Amino acid sequence: MIEIPSDLNPSLVPLAFLLGNWAGAGVTDFPGAEKANFGQEVSFTHDGRDFIEYRSYTWVLDAEGNKVKPLESESGFWRVDENRKVEVVMVRDDGVVEVWYGELADKKPQIDLVTDAVARTAASAPYTGGKRLYGYVKGDLMWVGEKQTPEVPLRPYMSAQLKKVVTPEEVADMARNLGDLPDDGIAFFK
């Protein structure tokens, strides 16, 4: 279920499906790097202004699903305009800053993004651009990323399926709001 917080900036309502903390796993595979399963934690938060703050942390998983080592970290800011055009400014721990543009799909919670600008530090690996697809599917957040370098044409390199994480604070809020349920709790479902 997609909830729209009462203090969400009205311009961000089309992005409300992203809000919250997400965790899950995926796969990464790109020429020149080791193919691996990875874990991921993502947060999309807001403070009432006209953007959503984004943070993502990934790490390599071993065959048993244990954390082995950090993979990538990135953070940024997402905005959407009245025409459902999305813009994202993102910085990654490997020395890359990106500007992404895209749009929300019509009548479904899905976003297609393409890099418009890429800036790299001298220490970063070669990278010239990418594409991403995010979608809210049956309560999960799913995404796939593509990237290109001067040596490798645009191709998929990472994808993940993430589940919504309920924090202890959210559980406490739910418990405080149970007063609206009937005493036996069963009548609520009739």
Image (cartoon, rainbow, N blue to C red):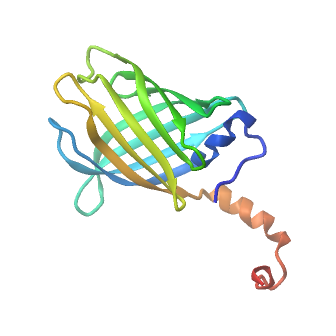
Q: How many marks?
A: 0
Residue at image coords 22%, 61%: 63
Q: Nearer the viewer, residue 190 or 84?
A: 84
Q: Residue furthest front?
A: 106
Q: Residue furthest top?
A: 122
Q: Is residue 55 left or right of residue 84?
A: left
Give the position of the C terminus as an image quadrant.
bottom right
Residue at image coords 77%, 41%: 7
Give the position of the N terminus as an image quadrant.
bottom right
| Rendering coords of residue 25 (x, y %) | 37, 55
Q: Is residue 9 above or below residue 189?
A: above
Residue at image coords 60%, 30%: 79
Q: Is residue 9 visible?
A: no
Q: Is residue 38 above or below residue 129?
A: below
Q: Is residue 180 left or right of residue 154?
A: right
Q: Is residue 69 left or right of residue 53?
A: left
| Rendering coords of residue 89 (x, y %) | 50, 25
Q: Is residue 148 above or below residue 176?
A: above
Q: Quadrant of residue 121?
A: top left
Residue at image coords 42%, 30%: 114
Q: Quadrant of residue 153?
A: top left
Q: Is residue 86 visible?
A: yes
| Rendering coords of residue 186 (x, y %) | 76, 85
